[in-house]
Image (cartoon, rainbow, N blue to C red):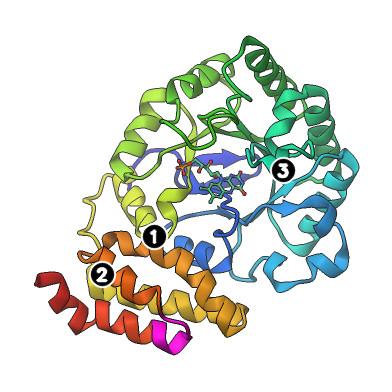
Amino acid sequence: MSSNVGLKLGSLSLDVPFFQASLSGYSDYAMRMFARRFGCPFALADVMLAKSVARPEVLAKACFQPGADEHPVGAQILGETAAAMAKAARALVAAGYDVIDVNCACPVPKVTRRGRGGALLDDPDAAIEIVKAVRDAVDCPLLVKLRIGMDYSIRSQDNFWEIMTRAIEQGVDALVIHGRTVSERYRGKANWDVLASVKKRFPSATIIGSGDVFDAREAIERMKRTGLDGFVVARGAIGNPWIFRDLRCVWEGRPVPPPPDLAEQRLILLEHLARVAQGHPEHRAVGYFRKFLVFYARRHPKRRHMLGALMKAKTRAEVEAGIDAWYGDAGDRAGRR
Ligand SMILES: Cc1cc2nc3c(=O)[nH]c(=O)nc-3n(C[C@H](O)[C@H](O)[C@H](O)COP(=O)(O)O)c2cc1C
């Protein structure tokens, strides 16, 4: 084992300095469960709209409930009013979530137009009112997710530093910062130099970086180089739970195993499909699973052909038959042709 320390999120200690980010539309129970199986110590659920999950009949739905076997697990909340955010945080902790994360990062226009997510970066008073209300509402570890600003203007940078300073004063346990501005959305490269400067300015705060984590070795080297306390894995984990196994190996100084072969990928795909089918009616399950399939397909030697065939499958049985054909013996043969 390495002598490296992991990551502390308030009272929660992780043995490694990374975890799985909130990914709207993806980070459901199945994705979190696979992440955990491959070595991820903690994961955030899909972002939840505070005013919805503050209602008991909504929060009671299976998709909003944490799994009994997945602790620690975190809930991320999105909203524009302090009262709704505090109420949702309290309800989510009562439902079993171990960590609350306040979203001040989402760049999607239909979210920002309502003063939620990334729009809070333009309004330090509103952002801090929410952080304070949530901090007062719950005793568990509290995270705030932000981007490095609305844009690169001086005004936006001032707002960012003000929110950081005041959020830390409020007793936030860690700040998870995506190294892009809201206006950049996902364009270009994440700016880890800015993230390094944030850590320099707030050396005693727990600063967790986000952005372009696709390769285990590179991610850990970057974290060490920038002096950040940890990082989250986001797109790099979709259809790729093996990234956590690789990250753990690099972190613990063990050799990284070879990538999963088609037979191993096939088993995970079939299990993932079965999990999805448990939670959705068949026609929805197939459509929903396709989103993950596109990412799993990246490892397939005949990606285009495989996807062309599998995306046409309409029933669970057809998807399974396609997975067997492309990842079983037939797929193996196709890969070698
Ligand atoms: C499809 C998608 C959904 C996302 N949903 C959320 C979300 O709900 N909450 C959040 O804080 N970040 C969300 N993010 C941002 C990621 O957590 C992460 O900060 C960002 O993708 C940068 O990391 P990456 O380049 O390693 O993917 C989302 C990103 C993507 C691509």
Type of amino acid under label 1: Phe
Q: Earlier in the sequence, mark 1 or mark 3?
A: 3
Question: Which corner quadrant holds the C terminus?
Answer: bottom left
Residue at the spot of label 1 = 295
- Apparent side of residue 222 relative to residue 138 in the rendered image (left or right): left
- Percent position of residue 167, x then y: 73, 27
Q: Residue furthest right?
A: 83
Q: Residues within 10 Å of mark 3 (few under 14, many from 20)?
A: some
- Which residue was labeled with disc 2? 305
Q: Which mark is residue 164?
A: none
Choose the circle earlier in sequence order: 2 or 1. Answer: 1
Residue, x 85% and y 30% (percent of image)? Answer: 129
Residue stretch in magenta: 313-319
Disc 2 or disc 3, which is closer to the eye?
A: 2
Q: Residue at x 38, y 84 (%)?
A: 320
Whether residue 295 appears in magenta in the rendering, the answer is no
Q: Which numbered marker is on residue 111?
A: 3
At x 58%, y 50%, the residue is 22
Q: Is residue 102 visible?
A: no
Mark 1, secondary structure of its residue: helix
Tags 2 and 3 touching, CB below 8 Å: no
Q: Indicate the amino acid at tag 3.
A: Val
Cα distance between the residues tagged 2 and 1: 14 Å
Q: Residues within 10 Å of mark 2 (few under 14, many from 20)?
A: few
* SS of the residue under disc 3: helix
> Where's residue 55, x and y in %?
87, 61
